[in-house]
Image (cartoon, helix red, strand yellow):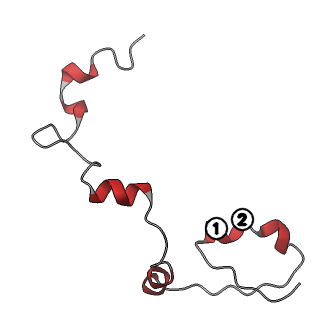
Amino acid sequence: MEQRIIEGTWEEVTRHARELAGHRVRVTVLDELSTNDAHSDAEPTAFDVLSKAGLIGTLKGGPSDLATNPAHMEGFGGE
């Protein structure tokens, strides 16, 4: 197997476990700053886009948690 670099989060790297089984590997753990720099060209996630658009969170003027209003909890968890 030729030498190659697999970069990403631990979860992304471990997806290659089967193809790397039986081979020697070297793991370098990058600090948070380096990790962000390495992925700066990555496409934004849906969460990033929706957060930036203000579509994730609470409604303006609405309750911070619908569970604080008993009317929203009627019948929840009941039989």
Residue that lies at the very extreme toward the top in this rendered image: 79
| Residue 66 rendering spot, x and y as whole percentages | 23, 32
70 or 4: which is nearer to us?
4
Answer with the quarter of the image where residue 27 lies. bottom right
- Residue situated furthest left in the rendering: 61
List x then y, in percent, for residue 57. Answer: 26, 48
State the residue in front, 42 or 24: 42
Query: Secondary structure under badge 2?
Result: loop
Q: CA distance from mark 2 to mark 1?
A: 6 Å
The N terminus, quarter of image? bottom right
Residue receiving disc 2: 15
- Give the x, y percent position of residue 28: 63, 87
Amino acid type of the residue tagged 1 in the rendering: Glu
Q: Is residue 40 above or below residue 77?
A: below
Direction from residue 27 to residue 9 in the image, left or right: left
Q: Which residue is the site of mark 1?
A: 12
Residue at image coords 85%, 88%: 2
Please report the residue visible at 20 percent of the width from the left and 19 percent of the height from the top. Answer: 71
Q: Residue at x 47, y 78 (%)?
A: 41
Q: As shown in the figure, which amino acid type bears the numbered disc 2?
A: Arg
Image quadrant occupied by the C terminus: top left
Query: Looking at the rendering, which quadrant does residue 40 occupy?
Result: bottom left
Position in image of residue 54 (x %, y %): 24, 53
Q: Is residue 74 above or below residue 44?
A: above
Residue 39 shown left or right of residue 76 in the figure: right
Left or right for 25, reference 35: right
Judge left or right: residue 42 versus residue 4: left
Image mark for residue 52: none
Helix, strand or loop at mark 1 = helix
CA neighbours of label 2 inside 10 A, class few (<14), some (14 to 19), many (20+)? few
Residue closer to the observer: 13 or 45:
45
Assess disc 1: are there few (<14), some (14-19) or many (≥20) residues with their C-alpha within 10 Å of its C-alpha.
Answer: few
